[in-house]
């Protein structure tokens, strides 16, 4: 298996807490982003980080195989990053290391014929 660097996810815990609290009150991602002067994508990732159960896998090879399996099952890169506590780029590199294919080769959004 090709080697890759595992990069831990660093996300502002205060932002995560604010987003989770506001979402519990029923506020939309766009409204939260506007109120906090940030982007909707960052708010969506903060929600994923706050609501996704973390799974710690210390072995990079095992992590890469699990990411490839989850990705083939339809998991988004952001979800994988939140689940394993790594950056999205690291999740992509892990997928490439496990499968030997570019991360763009499997797009879960495309309809399978």
Image (cartoon, rainbow, N blue to C red):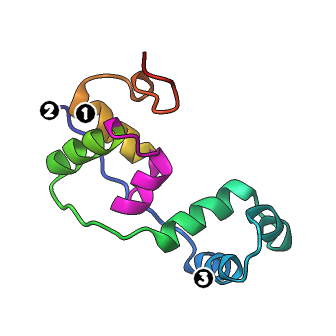
Res 89 → quadrant: top left
- Look at the picture and state if 21 lies above or below 106: below
| Nearer the camera: disc 1 or disc 3 | 3
The image shows residue 22 at horizontal and vertical percentages of 71, 80
Q: Between marks 2 and 3, how big is the CA–CA gap?
A: 38 Å
Q: Which mark is residue 97?
A: 1
Res 23 → quadrant: bottom right
At 45% from the left and 25% from the top, the residue drawn is 104
At 59% from the left and 76% from the top, the residue drawn is 16
Nearer-the-camera pick, 38 or 78: 78
Q: Which mark is residue 17?
A: 3
- Look at the picture and state if 62 lies above or below 86: above
At 40% from the left and 22% from the top, the residue drawn is 105
For the residues bearing labels 2 and 1, Cβ distance under 8 angstroms: yes
**How many C-alpha atoms fall within 10 Å of the one at disc 2: few (<14), some, or many (≥20)?**
few
Q: Is residue 7 left or right of residue 22?
A: left
**How many C-alpha atoms fall within 10 Å of the one at disc 3: few (<14), some, or many (≥20)?**
some
Please identify the quadrant where the C terminus is shown. top left
Res 53 → quadrant: bottom left
Q: Between marks 1 and 3, how big is the CA–CA gap?
A: 34 Å
Residue 42, magenta (yes or no)? no
The image shows residue 74 at horizontal and vertical percentages of 40, 40
The image shows residue 31 at horizontal and vertical percentages of 83, 67
- Look at the picture and state if 77 lies above or below 28: above
Nearer-the-camera pick, 31 or 89: 31
Q: Which mark is residue 1?
A: 2
Of labels 1 and 3, earlier in sequence is 3
């Amino acid at each position: 298996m090709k080697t890759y660097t595992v990069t831990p996810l660093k996300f502002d815990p205060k932002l995560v807490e604010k987003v989770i609290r506001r979402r519990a009150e029923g506020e939309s991602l766009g409204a939260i982003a506007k109120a906090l002067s940030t982007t909707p994508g960052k708010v969506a990732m903060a929600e994923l980080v706050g609501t996704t159960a973390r799974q710690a896998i210390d072995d990079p090879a095992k992590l890469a195989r699990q990411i490839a399996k989850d990705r083939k099952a339809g998991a988004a890169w952001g979800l994988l990053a939140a689940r394993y506590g790594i950056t999205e780029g690291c999740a992509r590199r892990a997928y490439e290391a496990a499968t030997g294919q570019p991360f763009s080769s499997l797009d879960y959004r495309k309809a399978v014929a």
